[in-house]
Amino acid sequence: MTRNDGRKKDELRPIQMDKDYLMHPEGSVLITVGNTKVICNATIEEKVPPFMRGEGKGWVTAEYSMLPRATESRTRREASAGKIGGRTMEIQRLIGRALRAVVDLEKLGERTIWIDCDVIQADGGTRTASITGAFVAMADAVAKLQDAGKITHYPLKDFLAATSVGIAAEEGAILDLNYLEDSAAEVDMNIVQTGKGQFVELQGTGEESTFSREQLNELLELGELGVQQLINAQKEVLGEVALRIERNMEAVK
Amino acid sequence: MTRNDGRKKDELRPIQMDKDYLMHPEGSVLITVGNTKVICNATIEEKVPPFMRGEGKGWVTAEYSMLPRATESRTRREASAGKIGGRTMEIQRLIGRALRAVVDLEKLGERTIWIDCDVIQADGGTRTASITGAFVAMADAVAKLQDAGKITHYPLKDFLAATSVGIAAEEGAILDLNYLEDSAAEVDMNIVQTGKGQFVELQGTGEESTFSREQLNELLELGELGVQQLINAQKEVLGEVALRIERNMEAVK
Amino acid sequence: MTRNDGRKKDELRPIQMDKDYLMHPEGSVLITVGNTKVICNATIEEKVPPFMRGEGKGWVTAEYSMLPRATESRTRREASAGKIGGRTMEIQRLIGRALRAVVDLEKLGERTIWIDCDVIQADGGTRTASITGAFVAMADAVAKLQDAGKITHYPLKDFLAATSVGIAAEEGAILDLNYLEDSAAEVDMNIVQTGKGQFVELQGTGEESTFSREQLNELLELGELGVQQLINAQKEVLGEVALRIERNMEAVK
Amino acid sequence: MTRNDGRKKDELRPIQMDKDYLMHPEGSVLITVGNTKVICNATIEEKVPPFMRGEGKGWVTAEYSMLPRATESRTRREASAGKIGGRTMEIQRLIGRALRAVVDLEKLGERTIWIDCDVIQADGGTRTASITGAFVAMADAVAKLQDAGKITHYPLKDFLAATSVGIAAEEGAILDLNYLEDSAAEVDMNIVQTGKGQFVELQGTGEESTFSREQLNELLELGELGVQQLINAQKEVLGEVALRIERNMEAVK
Amino acid sequence: MTRNDGRKKDELRPIQMDKDYLMHPEGSVLITVGNTKVICNATIEEKVPPFMRGEGKGWVTAEYSMLPRATESRTRREASAGKIGGRTMEIQRLIGRALRAVVDLEKLGERTIWIDCDVIQADGGTRTASITGAFVAMADAVAKLQDAGKITHYPLKDFLAATSVGIAAEEGAILDLNYLEDSAAEVDMNIVQTGKGQFVELQGTGEESTFSREQLNELLELGELGVQQLINAQKEVLGEVALRIERNMEAVK
Amino acid sequence: MTRNDGRKKDELRPIQMDKDYLMHPEGSVLITVGNTKVICNATIEEKVPPFMRGEGKGWVTAEYSMLPRATESRTRREASAGKIGGRTMEIQRLIGRALRAVVDLEKLGERTIWIDCDVIQADGGTRTASITGAFVAMADAVAKLQDAGKITHYPLKDFLAATSVGIAAEEGAILDLNYLEDSAAEVDMNIVQTGKGQFVELQGTGEESTFSREQLNELLELGELGVQQLINAQKEVLGEVALRIERNMEAVK
């Protein structure tokens, strides 16, 4: 039983990450996962939100949006609607929370990292592609901070990537669902993990359906497999900056 | 090592569910979990949202809110702020999605069940208490529909309850966190399960932290334990209506 | 001619006030007037709005809301609509203004008392029940301020309660209208009075109708009767705190 | 003791009503009461709001606004703030409700009368001037409807005008307060009455103060005096149209 | 070929400017251009927006609105809609930008001039009438500032007025379009010029049509003719204040 | 005197247009003008806005947005702010109006063309680049309509492109301003023209400055030069579709 795009059940779609994609941001990556394309930009702001001032710690926050024609039929702009929808809120909170888990906020100092993930083409997995790409943009932006002597120690403790897994009626557990697969899946799970294989976020949902403990275990296996491949791709595109993260990983062993 | 309120690691807080709490709603429950109190009301509307018309299927949707002084210091009303915050959106989407997993929407017919969860006192676990209480309000409201001859078959396929589990720095894995425990926890997970022990939702988050596969397993054991106790409490308060659900559970064996 | 619930024309519905209803607020009362139930919470904030800073005086402000199913058919949440309706605005302005009339704002010092009135069940007279219950919550909250030594003199100058009166097509002038009576009334009047029988607010409205000076006088008599009974109930629930108010009433004789 | 502008306690400010003030509206009046100037326009719309369709009855609704420099210091536009304030809501609800009391909505037929009151200069009493001027604009607009043969019977049952009364620290009860008087008054009351002297609205407020039954009676006397003078001015400006109203008044004697 | 109101192609409509129209604003003009009537008020605020503080320079900003019945059929209030429309935004940005071009912001000092243009009757050309009237209100308001000794040098460098020109299907190029002409025009252009004939703004639009360089030149001739007549009217109404502007014009020759 | 990027006064920046840039839209172009990059998508919707129904004519409307880091420092999202700013409104109205001028709306039939211009990198001239790129996306989308047999005659009457011109303090009149030039320019003008050299829009603004008739003429010459080069680039990228437009241009000669 092959999938609608010919992949095997445990096969990721082709990945590409173009670093330094735009000229203005401190970190900028265009991530492509199959037909899904997300521009991930990282901005360093030299202050923190009011509720954190004076604590000597930094902050990471994220915003997520889709171009109206990222989708097959045109989606109304949230700016025109005058408010941000629930799905967008949920995703941008997830991205920020996930990234914060691998940042030593004290080493970052009183700064905010703004992450902007703008989906220009959507074919499933936009939130997990956003996390994977945003990690690279953030890693690059904080490397520049260190190179400029603004921070002493590189503050990222580990790599971080995300993928989706799900249960399809015919194929069973599958990795990295495209839009068609996602629409038809009975169970849908997003997994965010570190380079050491620790979980950061796990969000599994039965879509008008449920799943057993055995199915959960099968999904977790697949997800781990996918995340480690994504982290390998991150290491390649980050080059020397990846070494700084690896040194930090070793230090806390 | 005992917990801040003297409970054991695998012990739920005292539960109470007052059915028929308010006079107007079709289903109305005041659920009390320790110091957390949520009014859960179910409304039957004899139509579905525009995107579902003519399909012969029903819908379940939820709204969640907190009184300003449900919390220790006063929280600004979302109506005054003019918009619903991200946390609220996330919770109300979760409640609706979870409840839909145990409703046979075709048996419900072209009707919407509106669930309103209003937290009047908060001490941790408001979203899981909302799901547990809302299930009872919904079960009661659809029983009245059946009693009135508007639907032929009782549409709830299984019981549904939710609890939280987490990892505390000292106690390790604990069940049903109160507010103080939740604030200090390194990992926080919400588990929504059915009477048959199937997962409906699993949302685990490392709070600026991560968790291993072993820790995940430990949390899942605790969660399952808690959910089954909550479902026993639901059965008791639902009385004869519980039998209708049990018959449906057996039918699909 | 008896009323739809068997009361006499000058008879209030049964009243109950549960003090210390919730655990977090400085003052908290669940007021029940017939089938109308309102949670009234008082919060002390140790600052005043910007336009009053530095004047050495305090402030009292109120917010009012209804649960969606406080009413017979579900009412849309104002937070979902994104704005507060005219009726709500009118009521919360009335509550704040009425309470301020019996507070010596200088004795209160530079503090704000936030009053939150949340109607959980509505059967007419929610705004007058809110005022009557909120007075008790406020009286209790400021007593705690005095007990904690934060203010020297108890700042409430008199009691304050409110009721509605109206003119029904058949019964004529009646006291404390329930929802059915209110919907059918030709004239509707809200009366807010002090323990000394002084008027604080008087709002009479012909509902697509008008009223004469004689009818007005009849309504005022009924209202006064009702308010004094409500104030007696307040004294009982306030206990020792009522004595502080009575001492203030005598002092200005 | 004379008032700050030399008037006697029971003296109205000079009144002027310019009918047909603007070219587009069906009824248009510029009312001047002392220094207060309000443009009152009436629009006839050939449909009613959705909740009234098919009942064969009409509706009257009002909107109220102030130019930013109607006031001594500039007031922010509500359109810029993105929402309508509580005071505006309260006033426009009052205007609509008051006008509806003298309209036979069945004779009006399924039409909406939109009343727009735009204060171009404010010196106290803007809401009562709005009601007085809007009545004339409305009377004129419905006369045109009748002249065009769209309605058979003239639908206004009586005249309607409004004024304010209040209690000043030195002068005691006074009629038609200007802005300075209004700011200093201990008690402020708006009275809306018909040509037959019936009350339509009565809104009395102690401004951080209270008032006795005797004071109330004194205020009502003054108010009645003022309203009848305003109605005389309306009759004069309405000319022939006033006769249609008077005939209706006699018919229901 | 005469125009629908009998004017020649290069003829302005009758102009009137009533200075000191309202009592509160520092500068207040009712400008009448044919049937178009706009109240233009200027407010002096003794501070500048945050982004300009400490630069020793002033600012000019404008707001524009229409009464609902300024137009033939009622237009919904932007305050009721909860947001300002694109057309209004465009116009108020234009008015502010145009006025700033003739103000020496350094001579003005750290002050903001708020311009409010409220159209009470619309018959085409409301934005150009607003600019022409607002200039006079502003000129008057800053003259009072100088008279009060708050500024040393009169800060207006030149006169400023605006008119519209357009191309009609039959008449060709015409000056100062009324509403009917504007609706039918193929090309519509707004011209803002100074007393010295310099352009400040030029906005030409083909309405589902286009225009040639020759047509453009013809429109510019007409516009210049109209603006100079409007400036003559401004000089007349400004009296002595006009001399201050003329002295400034000579100084920079 | 050379410009800050070495260009001559009448020299455009390098242009590139990538057609079929995204997979979902009916027309999709990434336009690059120097460092300015805009994704222009065209969507065909098979209906028109309510006010146009039944007239047998189509409509063209546009939305414009910038990614937060299109700019040097991060710009807040309009969706987060909850409203669309004045500059955005102005630009999107301009784009829609300009494109409509070259579309035969009757030949288009009752359809709406939605144009979405999303600036991913900004360095001046984003609105003119948007128009130039959007024309190509629209031309392509309507060609597909014709190829699918949904419309009989190709509805674009002419080419359309836009550029900016301005007056710099040192260089005088210059073509196609980048961000630094635009910020410093005394006069700024946007010119939208057709392939036949007709004007569609002309928006010239003195930035706290003014300009003479001679300067205007100089700017118009430069602008015409630039637009014709842009139209040549459009023809190249449109290939066969350009011929359909050229045939329409000849037909109306």
Image (cartoon, coloured by chain):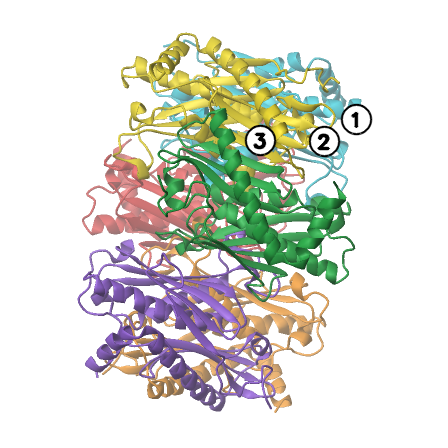
Chain colours: A cyan, B red, C orange, D purple, E green, F yellow
In this view of the protein, which residue sits in the foreground, E209 or C240? E209
The residue lying at 50 percent from left, 46 percent from top is: E127
- Could you tell me how far apart the alpha carbons at marks 3 and 1 are, in whole angstroms? 24 Å
Q: Which residue is mark 3?
A: A95
Q: Is residue B252 left or right of residue A126?
A: left
- Could you tell me how far apart the alpha carbons at marks 2 and 3 are, in whole angstroms? 16 Å
The residue lying at 38 percent from left, 38 percent from top is: B195
Q: Amino acid at mark 1?
A: His
Q: Which residue is mark 1?
A: A153
Label drawn at residue A104: 2
Percent coordinates x, y for residue A92 in the rendering: 55, 34
Query: Do the residues bearing badges 1 and 2 touch, measured as CB atoms within 8 Å?
Result: yes
Q: Chain of mark 1?
A: A
From this viewpoint, is residue F24 visible? no
Q: Amino acid at mark 3?
A: Ile
Percent coordinates x, y for residue D181 in the rendering: 57, 79
Q: Nearer the viewer, mark 2 or mark 3?
A: 3
The residue lying at 61 percent from left, 46 percent from top is: E160
Above-or-below relation of A101 to C57: above
Question: From the image, which quarter does the C terminus of chain A lie in?
Answer: top right
Q: Amino acid at mark 2?
A: Asp
Above-or-below relation of A208 to D224: above
Q: Secondary structure at mark 3?
A: helix
